[in-house]
Amino acid sequence: MIADVAIIVVASWLLGALARRCGQPTVIGQIVAGIALGPTLLGQLPGNPTGHLFPPEVKPFLTVLAQVAVVIFMFLAGYETDFGQLRRGSRAVVSVATLALVVPMGLGVGSLELFGGAFDAVGHGHAEGGSFTLFMAVAPAVTALPVLAAIVRERGMAGSPAGTVALASAGFMDVAAWLVLAAAFVGTGHQSGHSWPVTLLLITGFVAVMLLGVRPLLGKLLSRPAALLMNRVPLALGLALGSAWVTASLGLHPVFGGFLAGLTMPRVGNRPDPELRHTLEQTAGVLLPLFFVTTGLSFDIGSVDGDGAVLLALILAIAIVGKLGPGYAAARIGGLDPHQSALVAALVNTRGLTELIVLNAALDTGLIGPELFTVFVIMALVTTFMTGPLLHLVNRRAKALAPPGAAAKPAAGAARDQEGAGHAAK
């Protein structure tokens, strides 16, 4: 186990650095490292090194650590959700968040009606039809807010119209997607001995207790100048893991408990506590490569046969068309120019880590099978990899179409944006 953690950390660090050199976010390299250590690449070498490095008796320990990492990550996602920004969102934010969520949801559900045989051919899972339908609504509609935020910062787009609209829209879509996915998972867990209506009632009650009872109480306690409560990190970790345990006990995946705990944790003023956020980001950053490896051990591209390839083409078309077209049209409706609208469309097409968390949760609960899991992971990787090249093409086209006298001004503005992003990163 100790040797495996060392291998995972070093491999993720090296490929994360390589990803940055290639213009991709660090998390992309970490995802590739997790897949490379699994049966797709390392497992194909003579002697099956994957089987020797990650024997069956080690996988449960890796899974536990990966689960903790994901719970902390989901806590951060909930903690950084700014509902005030969503309420104050511009017309462009509302239109992009609505269309870029509803259209791929509709395409995903519609694909089940029109191409149900393609899903049956790969053995999609063992859940009831309604749960799988809700999953198919969410899976193509996810936008990875953390990866999107990293891309916006690294490309100097922070504060730009496209960056602001894309980030705010992704925040709204993330919350809506998790709510729909929670409904899909109700009753699919094996840890709850209650009926579906009782489970739903218990989950609703727990959410109400957290948001209406625990959140105000924590707000009062943390507002007191008591030295005992000055360090929020232990409290946040206890809240996240405890909430994850409760949701798991009620039949939901632990990620929902982590996300709910993040929504429950009081902020400092209207902003997240920078010390708490930094500490948990560092903790999740160290542990998340273990999650990518557990994903990679379940991912085997060799398991995708002819039927899987056809389904992959269908899902890629739904995911890409359902984001790029509506994203661009909604941004134009919201008042953005064609260049900024194209940037928004490229950004909201990013899947990344959030999609992988959704897929792992669906695999754990039996909503999807291993082959469909592999197909969706490939979709997540393709749509995330294409974000950088799409942004490059959009900017190059805008530069080519710009009048000669106006070309220097946007370049200077971009340089200032990148300089400001660099200072912010420092």
Image: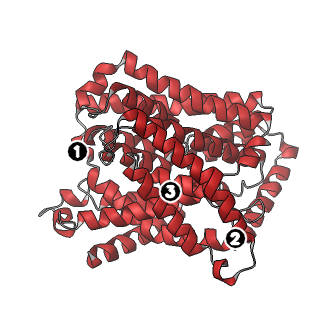
Q: Which mark is residue 258?
A: 3
Q: Which mark is residue 222?
A: 2
Given residues 240 and 317, the one toward you in this image is 240
Residue under the point 56% across and 57% down: 261
What is the image's colouring? secondary structure
Give percent across and percent down for residue 385: 49, 48
Left or right, residue 369 beside residue 131: left
Circle 1 SS class: helix
| Amino acid type, residue under disc 3 in the picture | Gly
Would you name the residue on which mark 1 appears? 302
| Amino acid type, residue under disc 1 in the picture | Gly
Q: Where, by quadrant of the figure, is residue 221 drawn?
A: bottom right
Residue under the point 34% across and 25% down: 129
Q: Which mark is residue 55?
A: none
Q: Given this view, does label 1 or label 3 mark the residue nearer the observer? A: 3
Are the two marked residues, 2 and 1, in contact with CB atoms closer than 8 angstroms? no
Given residues 50 and 222, the one toward you in this image is 222
| Amino acid type, residue under disc 2 in the picture | Leu
Circle 3 SS class: helix
Q: Given this view, does label 2 or label 1 mark the residue nearer the observer? A: 2
**Location of residue 173 with respect to 332 vertically, above or below:** below
Spatial CA span between label 2 and label 1: 52 Å
Residue under the point 57% across and 71% down: 235
Q: Residues within 10 Å of mark 1 (few under 14, many from 20)?
A: few
Give percent across and percent down for residue 25: 54, 59
Spatial CA span between label 2 and label 3: 20 Å
Q: Mark 2 or mark 1, which has the lower sequence index?
A: 2
